[in-house]
Image (spheres, rainbow, N blue to C red):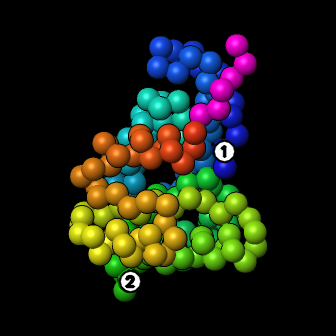
Amino acid sequence: MGEPTARIDNERAPFLTVMNVRLFLIAPDNIYSQALESFLLGVGNATGHQIELAGSASDTETAQEQIEETFPDLVLSDLGRPKGAIDGLAVARWAREQRDLRSINSPQVILCSLFEEDVFHDASYAAGAAAFIAKNSLSRELPQLLAHLFPLQPGVS
């Protein structure tokens, strides 16, 4: 996981350190990926997390190769479709296997989709994802999820 860096001092979180979070995005196209990156940087600023883009890909195979090279803390992936270029469930299973086989800190995986049905939630968690978020809920749920997955650490006053 990311390491704490500079201290922030505001009314919401006095004397907490900023948490660096290296993010890898898996999205179907560059426009969506860039919009999501901008949104996530804003979420990070609001929650005290310094989001750094470790990389991005538009297909599962490339993503897995780049994740092994960049060591992100968090992967945000489109759920995709098993026969499509992106298979978020395969990414979550792969990350869990890396953690189990190698005893390494594999990234936390958050899957997102336009679909909200319980079957997608269930499949995501069964595959090893830390969370599933419907795309229309990202702005509401992602800040809370970041705070849960990467808690800020008390700083020295």
Q: Which mark is residue 82?
A: 2
In the image, what residue occupies the spot 62% across and 18% down?
A: 15
Residue sticking out furthest to the bottom:
83
Q: Is residue 101 left or right of residue 46?
A: right
Position of residue 137 relative to residue 64, above or below, is: above
Give residue 33's mark. none
Label 2 SS: loop
Q: Secondary structure at mark 1?
A: loop
Question: Residue 138: x percent and y percent?
Answer: 32, 49
Image spot of residue 121 (x, y percent): 34, 68
Relative depth, front residue between 72 and 143: 143
**Residue segment shown in magenta:** 152-157
Give the label on residue 2, or none.
1
Residue at left offset 34%, top offset 57%: 133
Closer to us: mark 1 or mark 2?
1
Q: Quadrant of residue 102?
A: bottom right
Left or right: 125, with 107 as reference point: left
Q: Position of residue 73 (x, y in %)?
A: 61, 53
Principal secondary structure, stretch drawn in magenta: loop
- Residue 110 magenta-drawn? no
At label 2, the amino acid type is: Pro
Asked if residue 105 is positioned above or below residue 92 in the image, the reply reads: above
Amino acid found under the numbered disc labelled 1: Gly
Q: In the image, is 125 to the left or to the right of 49?
A: left
Quadrant where the image shows the C terminus: top right
Depicted 68 relative to depicted 153: above or below: below
Q: Nearer the viewer, residue 155 or 36?
A: 155
Of labels 1 and 2, earlier in sequence is: 1
Residue 3 location (% of width, % of height):
70, 40
Residue drawn at the location 72% of the way across and 77% of the way down: 101
**Residue 157 falls left or right of residue 131:** right
